[in-house]
Amino acid sequence: MLLVGILGYSPALRGGSADDGVSINRVAINNETIDNEAINVAVAANFYAPLKVISNKFEKQSGRKVRLIPGSSGKIFAQIKNGAPFDVFLSADQHKPAALEQAGLVVKGSRFTYAQGELVLWSNQAGLSFNGAKTIQSNVVKKLALANPKLAPYGLAAKQVLDSLNLYESVKNKLVYGENIAQTYQFVASGNAQVGFLALSQVIGMSESGEAKHRSGSFWRVPGELHQPIFQDAVILKRAKANSTASEFLKFLRTTRATHIIHAYGYKAMQTNSAQPVHHLMKRDKVKNNNEGVY
């Protein structure tokens, strides 16, 4: 499994060979690819860690190669529309895969919901006692990090939480925005922000031996009623319609071996071959700021 730069894709992927030492058997036909050995998988940054583990297992089982290109879902979406050579896209939301489907850029019937994510508020300080809105508003919190809501679905969910708690206007001067959820983590890990909204998968996971592990620090699991459900959809892009590795990889993503890994990283694995209904912008009433009921 190879990793291509988090903020873009490798120019080598445009051609028939790469200078990374991996042989690529690829034939371009009308801007499509026939390639039973290698695929380029664009993945939302929040799901990179579990997908790396899943990809390694797939490669060992199938003998085929998977290149992972992580980034914000919004950036990847724009790159796909501009012709980036990706075969599979795992988004952190449903709207972008659905939009690509409507534009005729994905293989018909390939879109499905592979996971439901969970949002957390994380600090790199161990033993910190979180008290919901009081923590966010505290004078101790000088900077609050979240991913750019225009690019990253977890950033949008974080903005929805602040809106639901009627906090956005009072804390907007504290906010620092990461381009994606990985950069948001770095803001908090480095101490440039005291707390930040992350994916649960960034603070829990599994070791190489398969044991559960937790990142140091403290976190608050944000109640799901404070934001839209974070359903995450995957698609095969149209250029890979003749690429059997792409379809086999997404089949593997739905196996028991893969869903065990997805669960270990704090996601709810969706036991379905189809997509959940696409949620629209929140129209429900904001949740009242009730310390007894919310926190």
Image (cartoon, helix red, strand yellow):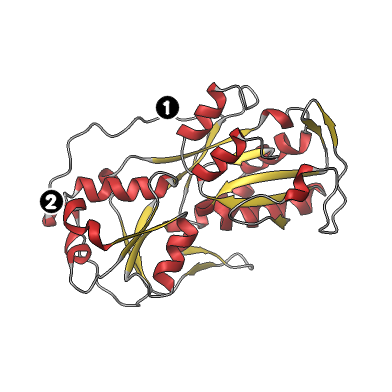
Q: Is residue 261 visible?
A: no
- Contact, mark 2 vs mark 1 (Cβ under 8 Å): no
Q: SS of the residue at dot 1? A: loop
In the image, what residue occupies the spot 30% across and 43% down?
227
Q: Is residue 54 left or right of residue 103?
A: right
Q: Earlier in the sequence, mark 2 or mark 1?
A: 1
- Residue 60 coordinates in the image, percent (x, y): 78, 54
> Separation of disc 2 and disc 1 at Cα?
29 Å
- Tag 2: residue type? Asn
Q: Is residue 209 left or right of residue 161?
A: right
Residue bearing mark 1: 277
- Tag 1: residue type? Pro
Query: Label 1: how many residues lie within 10 Å, few (<14), some (14-19) or many (20+)?
Result: few
- Residue 183 coordinates in the image, percent (x, y): 47, 61
Q: Which mark is residue 117?
A: none
- Residue 101's quadrant in the figure? top right
Residue extending furthest bottom? 126
In the image, what residue occupies the spot 37% across and 31% down?
279
Q: Is residue 286 visible?
A: yes
- Residue 138's quadrant in the figure? bottom left
Residue bearing mark 2: 289
Q: SS of the residue at dot 2? A: loop
In the image, what residue occupies the spot 12% across and 57% down?
291
- Residue 56 coordinates in the image, percent (x, y): 71, 56
- Residue 209 coordinates in the image, percent (x, y): 63, 68
Q: Is residue 213 above or below residue 279?
A: below
| Quadrant holding the C terminus | bottom left
| Quadrant holding the N terminus | bottom right
Q: Is residue 139 left or right of residue 33?
A: left
Given residues 266 and 278, the one toward you in this image is 278
Query: Label 2: how many residues lie within 10 Å, few (<14), some (14-19) or many (20+)?
Result: some
In the image, what residue occupies the spot 64% across and 51% down?
69
